[in-house]
Amino acid sequence: MRNYQLTPDQRRLFSRQGFLRLPGSFPSHLVRRWQQAAEQLELQALQVHSQGLHGRDFCVADDPEGPRLMRFRNLISHASELVIDTLASPAMMALARELCGPGAVPLHLDLFFKHQHPYPVTDWHQGAQHDRRFPYLNIGLYLDDAEEGDGCLRYVPGSQHGLQPIDDLAEHYGWSPPGVVEQPARAGDVLVQDKMILHGSQPKRSEGVRRTLYVEIRPWQAVMESRSQSSLWAHLRRRWMSQVMARADEADWPADWEQYPQAEETLSELVSQTEACWEPALPAVRASQPVYHPEYPIPSELRHLEKKAEVIQLPT
């Protein structure tokens, strides 16, 4: 028996609306480990930034509150053991198995840090564009609560099937286009979204930081056929999934999935090989020009801080 399974209703809901919340599905011991890792990575990034240096894998914003970490990328290289344990967890195995399917591999793993306004705003965007012949998932694992009305994610259900007129939607509707859904989450929740769904988030009003681990999963055949990355890059992701299979409960992995090589090298060797073949993530699609609306991107009651804030374009 599987340790975690999606229901038929959950699968239908995801197919129809393009996102799905799985409450409390990320184990508490992994939440705690990632919280500790996030604190260490944040300290590391800010120390490098204080020396006037830049890192390929993190982005620090200098805003009125001082330097604040926005995103730490490429976690495969920075927290490899924890990455494997996370990908091998029951809910993540279920998503790979039931929503992604044979050939599922991890593409990118990032930590996103959302601080109190004034701070860069995540505007309306759609993730990496593709021909949709294969699934492409972006999975958010929440390390902190995201309250309704406090800059949690907003989705436009059903928008994942093609490019949306983001300029027009933002100009006419701001943060409230027809059908928009505001999706709060709690620490330990898993929020899985179709990579192409239209989404964004308003400024965070409360104090403190909200941290979310994002994991992209896609069949490796899709990477090969689309040539979005090199064949070597794609095959390295298969070997990462071999490491996951070796650590996961056998009950969670389909016996007929024979598309992965035997895990032969050590994890540190695989990290070194992956670092040597680093390639950037595919870009998101956003408005083609600056958009003005009385409530977008900064709501009117926060406009007195508008000059201190900015819109940030982060890949997701």
Image: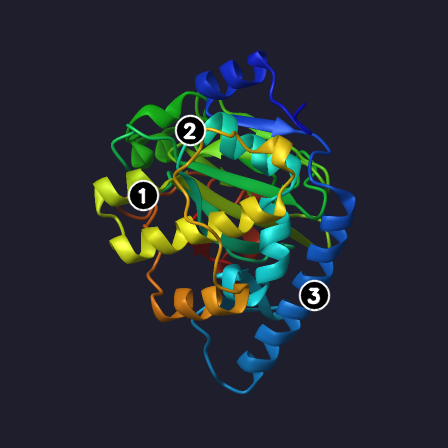
Left or right: 312 as drawn, with respect to 4: left
Q: Earlier in the sequence, mark 1 or mark 3?
A: 3
> At 46% across and 41% down in the image, what residue appears?
296
Q: Quadrant of the N terminus?
A: top right
Q: Earlier in the sequence, mark 3 or mark 2?
A: 3
Image position of 119 with respect to 218: above or below: below
Name the residue type under label 1.
Answer: Val
10 Å crowding of disc 2: few (<14), some (14-19), many (20+): some
Q: Which mark is residue 173?
A: 2
Q: Is residue 11 visible?
A: yes
Are the residues tagged 3 and 2 within 8 Å (C-beta)?
A: no
Residue 300 in which image quadrant: top right
- Give whichever of 190, 297 is nearer the camera: 190
Residue 69 in which image quadrant: bottom right
Residue at the extreme bottom of the image, as rendered: 51
> At 57% across and 36% down in the image, what residue appears?
93
Estimate the spatial distance between the alpha carbons at disc 1 and disc 2, rounded to whole Å.
18 Å
Name the residue type under label 3.
Answer: Glu
Residue at the disc numbered 1? 285
Residue at the disc numbered 3? 39
